[in-house]
Image: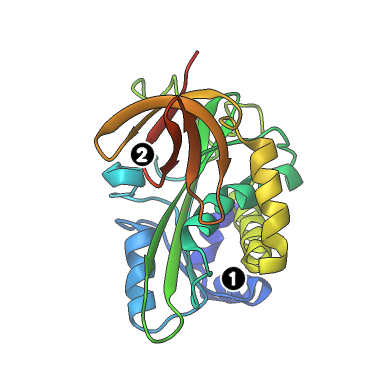
Amino acid sequence: MPRLVLLAHPAVASAVSRELGRDLEYHNAIASTQTRARELADAGATRGIVVANEQTAGQGTRGRTWVAAAGTSLLASWILRPAPAAPALFAALAGVAVARALATLGCEDASLKWPNDVELDGRKVAGALAHGSSDGRGGLLVIGIGVNVHQQELPAEIARTATSLAIAGHGVDRLALLARITTELDRIESPAEQHAAMSEWRERSSLIGRDVAVRSAGRDFSGRADAIDDEGALLVHTGSGVERVITGDVVVKH
């Protein structure tokens, strides 16, 4: 039996919750861990994790969906209250947390694509989604992370741009990966750790120093991706100056 589904047993979930220092809610199937985590946060939760074996309406960036068959992916959302000082930067650095977690489990070659994708061999293996809000309790950030783990093949429409740990030759346990990502997310919450995490993001970046094509806010332009700033925006040097990209689609020009 895959170990992640053991979280359906209250005693196991309670033990893992104590180990991780966070309230943990497991679902065999749920529409979206991100939606459920936001509901819990609205009800007062501060340090929870919602994890599922399957999502029926998983969320991706910019309104896209995250498609994964039951039992194939790590699907989880972390509640952070109070919110980090720079939520967009933290969302980008969540990719560093995933890459570090994968490295501890034997997958050391992950690269990062702005804003929050994790890639193996140039194909997406994981992604993060952030929802933030302000309130009188220090603000809230919910980080949803999906990692393709056990898929032996992917739907034809994404097979050229996505992969899984299994396809890349890595056998990883989802419960172990959940624990390692939680540890790494906790590390990058510390302001003292974020400088090192930003340096690692740049080292792992598949964009920095390369010519890119950008579509952002209805505009198309090209330039060289130079850096991310302290708020997580991508800085692209163009013929007319530096463009600060907050959201958008960015691809490497070949």
Task: List x then y, in percent, for residue 205.
Answer: 61, 35
Direction from residue 223 to residue 170 in the image, left or right: right
- Residue 157 figure quarter: top left
Q: Nearer the viewer, residue 83 or 232?
A: 232
Query: Which of the two discs, 2 and 1, labels the residue nearer the N terminus?
Result: 1
**On screen, residue 96 above or below 122:** below
Q: Residue at x 68, y 53 (%)?
A: 197
Q: Nearer the viewer, mark 2 or mark 1?
A: 2
Q: How many labels does the image show?
A: 2
Q: Which of 214 and 240 is in front in this view?
A: 240
Q: What residue type is labelled 2?
A: Gly
Q: Which residue is drawn at 66% across and 67% down?
A: 191
Q: Nearer the viewer, residue 35 or 90?
A: 90
Q: Which mark is residue 248?
A: 2
**On screen, residue 77 above or below 68:** below
Q: What's the CA distance linking mark 2 and mark 1? A: 41 Å
Q: Which amino acid does label 1 sit on?
A: Val
Give the crowd class for mark 2: few <14, some 14-19, many >=20 residues within 10 Å: some
Give the labeled residue for mark 1. 12
Task: List x then y, in percent, for residue 143.
Answer: 46, 60
- Secondary structure under tag 2 reads loop
Task: List x then y, in percent, for residue 153.
Answer: 47, 25
Direction from residue 196 to residue 230 in the image, left or right: left
- Secondary structure under tag 1 reads helix
Residue 134 shows in this picture: yes
